[in-house]
Amino acid sequence: MQPHPNQRPLGQRLLWFAALWLGGVGTVAVISFALRLWIAPK
């Protein structure tokens, strides 16, 4: 098996990984904050 000849450079792959990870963490944070405001308003 040969590796794909058009693999992206490591920097671009790490950037995509970081962007997707931050997107997932941000989504969970927004949902948890909204649930907290909905369930336990001041």
Image (cartoon, rainbow, N blue to C red):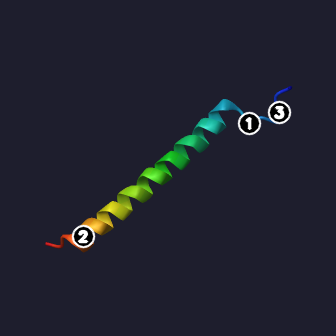
User: In the image as oriented, which residue stretches furthest toward the left?
Assistant: 42
Verify CB contact (< 8 Å) between mark 2 and mark 3: no
* Disc ID at residue 34: none
Amino acid type, residue under disc 2 in the picture:
Leu
Q: Is 16 on the left-hand or right-hand side of 29? A: right
Q: Is residue 34 above or below residue 8?
A: below
Residue with the mark numbered 1:
8
Q: Which residue is drawn at 77% across and 35% down?
A: 7
Q: Distance between the residues labelled 2 and 3?
A: 48 Å
Q: Is residue 37 left or right of residue 18?
A: left
* Quarter of image, res 35: bottom left
How far from the left and from the top, in percent, is residue 41?
A: 18, 73
Furthest residue in direction top, as rendered: 1
- Amino acid on which the number 1 mark rests in the picture: Arg
The amino acid sitting under disc 3 is His
Q: What element carries label 1?
A: loop
Q: Which quadrant holds the C terminus?
A: bottom left
Within 10 angstroms of label 2, few (less than 14), some, or many (20 or more) residues? few
Q: Residues within 10 Å of mark 3 (few under 14, many from 20)?
A: few
Q: Which of marks 1 and 3 is in front?
A: 3
Q: Which of marks 2 and 1 is nearer the N terminus?
A: 1
Residue 4's label in the rendered image is 3
Residue behind mark 2: 37
Q: Position of residue 24 (x, y in %)?
A: 48, 52
Q: Give percent across and percent down for residue 8.
A: 73, 36
